[in-house]
Image (cartoon, rainbow, N blue to C red):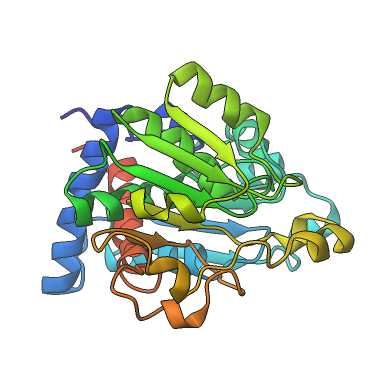
Amino acid sequence: MKNDFFGKDVISVNDYSREDLELLFSRTNEMKKLVEERGGDERLKRKMMAALFYEPSSRTFSSFISAMQRLGGGIIPLNGMTNTSVAKGETLEDTARVFSAYVDVLVIRHSQAGSLATAAKYCSKPIINAGEGATGEHPTQAFIDLFTIKKIFGRIEGLHFLIIGDLAHYRPTNSLMMALTNFKNITLTLATPKQVPIQDYVRKFLKVSKISFSETSEFDKLLPEVDVLYVTRVKKEYMSESLYREIQGSYIVNNSLVKKMKKKSLIMHCLPRIDEIDKEVDDDPRSVYFRDQLQNGLYVRMALLDLVLNKD
């Protein structure tokens, strides 16, 4: 299977076909086995990765660092750019140019949607989007979510997805919703407070792709039909205090709700969780946000780095 990831930027899920995703999933399975049996190998020895995070991160940052090191590569980790020339006014484009002289791949999180596509024009090495802006994308999280779903269900086709919460400021679900258009017979239901609907560009993309999707403010009655319940956090950092107070707590998933769901279904959240999922749900066998979904972040990012940096 042709490796269309090699040497290229990873900016948007829309750049990838179903075949590309299947290649990534296959390589991810290899990485999972590698870590479980040997802890890693040296296939990226003498390769270097810069992790340039302009916004806070725990999971994405640390899993990329771990992924590169488990494959024998070196890292330049910057979780926060206040101690770099960014504090002096250096632009993202210039920063990308500088680090491309030192490393083989740049993993960047930035506060402005669309910024990484612009930076990539000035950068001689591949850029991987680790999340950009309130309204942009987080493609690697979507890859993780899709791999997790396929690993558990054995398929993605024909599943009913219910995504609830703040979808106006949630880049992981922007990527996930658009990536789902690669699969047949998907049913997608979006439940959001009216103040935070999905981004217009995502809605237009879904309509053009002719995926079956609907929007609602109530979802309780749908739970018995749902295969994947994806819960989002209200992004306080991207809204006014008054709006946050207005919508925070609108949707809280607890045991009384999840007991309505199928025995074989999934409860997902890319974390951090605040109070949108009650802690009593954590031990439910259908909850995967602290288990498979979290653990697969390492394997998917190992696979992605391998595909971007190695042709074969």
Q: Name the residue: 66% across, 35% down.
A: 199
Q: Position of residue 203 (x, y in %)?
A: 59, 28
Identify the residue at the far front of this view: 221
Relative to 212, say whether 165 is above or below: below
The correct choice, above or below, for 190 with respect to 56 in the image is above
Q: Which part of the image, by quadrant, shows the N terminus? A: top left
Left or right, 250 with respect to 152, comes to right
Is residue 130 found left or right of 307 in the rendered image?
right
Q: Nearer the viewer, residue 62 or 206?
A: 206
Q: In the rendered view, does 45 fall on the left or right side of 55?
A: left
Q: How many marks?
A: 0
- Can residue 121 be seen by looking at this rendering? no
- Taking the image as drawn, is residue 170 in sight? yes
The answer to whether 12 appears left or right of 268 in the picture is right
Point out residue 96 in the picture as x, y percentages from the top left corner: 62, 44
Quadrant, the C terminus: top left
State the residue lying farthest toward the left: 37
Q: Nearer the viewer, residue 142 or 51?
A: 142
Q: Residue 90: x and y, percent?
A: 78, 49
Residue that sits furthest to the top in the current view: 208
Residue 181, by quadrant, is top left
Q: Which percent across, then down, holds residue 157?
A: 25, 36
**Residue drawn at x 51%, y 57% as measured from the top left:** 50
Where, by quadrant of the figure, is residue 81 drawn? bottom right
Name which residue lies at 24% across and 60% down.
Answer: 264
